[in-house]
Amino acid sequence: MTDPESIKNAFASIPNISTVVANAGIASNQSLLETSRDLWDRTLAVNLSGAFHTILAAAEKMRHCGNGSIVLTASTNSYDGEADLIAYNASKAGLLGILHTAANELGPYGIRVNAVCPGLIRTRLTKASFTDPKILSDYFKQVP
């Protein structure tokens, strides 16, 4: 996800594309004051730049067909600013900025761009949260 040429080559190997999901993501719990430049850069490279390059490669192919659908996986962290996830939160909020611009620019080509914003779901990335009853209890108190 951090190598635009690899993404471009992957799309070049597929003749027709109608649907693309940009779902790759990483996160590390670090407070704002403890977030290193390396953590910041790596998180944005995967979560934000990777999605940008995926959208770009997909749009290049889809615009010639006159239709397509691109779905981004953002997060509830796109707008709620959960503590100790500054880089992740910024990257997911950035996806919503990309979403709005891409939807406006690609709509005339018949390409839809949407995002889903899931909350805490059981994945390898969130495994630790599901082993701590306190985290789950606090988190799900806020879910209707």
Image (cartoon, grey):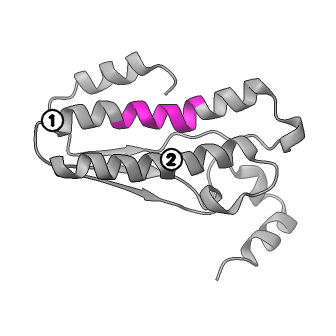
Residue 59 % position (x, y): 26, 37
Residue under pointer 1 = 16
Classify residue 24 as left or right of residue 19. right
Seen from the viewer's position, the closer of residues 88 and 99 is 99
The part of the chain drawn in magenta is 45-55
Residue placed at 64% from the left, 83% from the top?
144
Q: Secondary structure at mark 2?
A: helix
Residue under pointer 2 = 95
Residue placed at 68% from the left, 63% from the top?
80
Classify residue 81 as left or right of residue 104. right
Residue 9 % position (x, y): 31, 18
- Above or below for 130 versus 70: below
Task: Identify the mark nearer the N-term, 1 or 2.
Answer: 1
Q: How many marks?
A: 2
Q: Residues within 10 Å of mark 2 (few under 14, many from 20)?
A: many
Seen from the viewer's position, the closer of residues 134 and 60 is 60
Q: Secondary structure at mark 1?
A: loop
Query: Marks 1 and 2, how far apart in space?
Result: 25 Å
- Mark whose residue sits in front, 1 or 2: 2
Q: Main secondary structure of the magenta part?
A: helix
- Above or below for 123 versus 142: above
Does the rendering let one see residue 121?
Answer: no
Q: Amino acid at mark 2?
A: Leu
Q: Amino acid at mark 1?
A: Asn
Residue 54 % position (x, y): 38, 34
Residue placed at 73% from the left, 74% from the top?
140
Q: Tell whether position 103 is magenta.
A: no
Q: Residues within 10 Å of mark 1 (few under 14, many from 20)?
A: few
